[in-house]
Image (cartoon, rainbow, N blue to C red):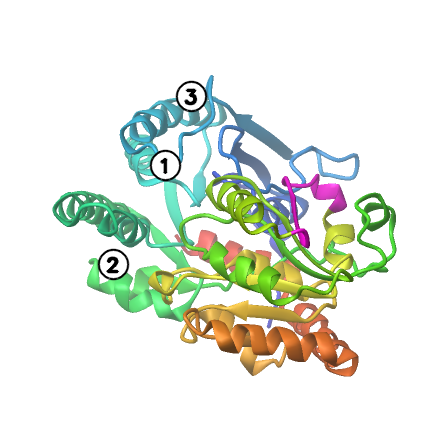
Amino acid sequence: MKVLNEKMKKTLNIVVYDNSGHPFQVQLSRQIADLGHDVTHIYSKSFNTPQGNLIVQENDPPSFEIVGIELKESIAKYKFIKRKFQERSFAKLVILELARLKPDIIICSNVPLDTLSLVQKYCKSKNIKFLTWVQDIYSKAIKNYFDKKNKLFSYLVYNYYRTMESKIFKKSDNCISISNDFNPILIEMGVKKENICVIENWANLDEISIKDKVNHWSIKEQLDKTFNFCYTGTMGLKHNPDLIVALSQHFKNPDINIFVTSQGIGATYLQKKKDELNLNNLILLPFQDYRQYSNVLASADVLVAVLEKEAGILSVPSKILSYHCAKRPILAAMPLANLASKILINNNSGLVSDTDDIASFISNAEELYNSPNLREEIGINAVRYANEKFNIKIIANKFLKIIHKI
């Protein structure tokens, strides 16, 4: 790919607003700033999720700023009415920052619809170019959640948010989707084909390094001498914690652990099952400091990822991409049509079973446990894929090409 000489172009004032504060989004912000633009990275301090390196470093360019925005209390993820009001309040705080910064363009990622709609309305009133980085189809996720509770209420809520989401996409100056699978849905929602670009997600190779299994973190957690299956990150409504329970029930060997670093509804469920079933080999830990992330991944012999069938093609777990950087084999249970499944299968970087096929999931786990050579081969394939696909300079220039176009 021909890389643009961005430092020869006009300096732009850019805001990247990633509500979750994930690692690869802030890496993008740093890289764009390094290419000579003024970049402010905004994220939420009130949203409980794994976050990246959100402190300005000594080697960061002076044109780079990080702003964490915080409500008086954490976002109530699973309290629908309260969360709606919180997200509207949060939008007002974001708008105050935008009024201070006066950016030329904003890139929005992982922003809840009630917040995103108000932020977009403000940007349109101030002629701030608006780029939606589509990580998920939120209205579909909302429908999946409420379908399990009340079909009529689900229908009403879905139509409300589907309309809102469609308007946001159509009013955006461009939509960057993370998979070609999203594009037909965006077009169905009224987005013009020429206003859609695809840039697949990646992981931060600069910050996730290959480490030895025996490291200060694994020693501290007493994971340095056992065989370890590891699940890290969010375990929410798109994930099936019962697969982790099944893994723990299957491996009764005291030299085998299944350790999870997570918080929230999934982790609470796992704690309940651990107590009920006396699963001594299931080790539950909270989210870890991002500076320890490489050591956490290195402590695993096998890295685990799960995704509910309802997520279908409309979610690409970022943990799968991060796992590739650690040179560890990946054990996954997810829809086979999902982009993450395709990456694992096409690159032989993990063993994948369909979400509902627990027998295959356990069989794949056994195969990885019993074959050190297979684990080594798959781990090498994983890190090779990361090195080939996760070049942040090339990725940043893809974003800047879109920015200059609009």
Q: What amino acid type is highlighted by mark number 2?
A: Val
- Tell me if I can see residue 245 in this picture: yes
Magenta range is: 280-292
Q: Answer yes or no: do the residues labelled 1 and 2 have beta carbons within 8 Å?
A: no
The residue to which callout 3 is attached is 96
Q: CA distance from mark 1 to mark 3?
A: 27 Å
Expressed as whole percent of the image width and height from the top left, the position of residue 22 reads 57, 45
Front disc: 1 or 3: 1
Say whether disc 1 or disc 3 marks the residue closer to the N-terminus: 1
Expressed as whole percent of the image width and height from the top left, the position of residue 44 reads 50, 32
The residue to which callout 2 is attached is 191
User: Measuring 53% from the left and 73% from the top, which residue is drawn there?
Assistant: 361
Q: CA distance from mark 3 to mark 2?
A: 29 Å
Mark 3 neighbour class, 10 Å CA radius: few under 14, some 14 to 19, many 20 or more: few
The residue to which callout 1 is attached is 78
User: Measuring 76% from the left and 45% from the top, which residue is drawn there?
Assistant: 292
Expressed as whole percent of the image width and height from the top left, the position of residue 65 reads 62, 32
Is-magenta flag for residue 295? no
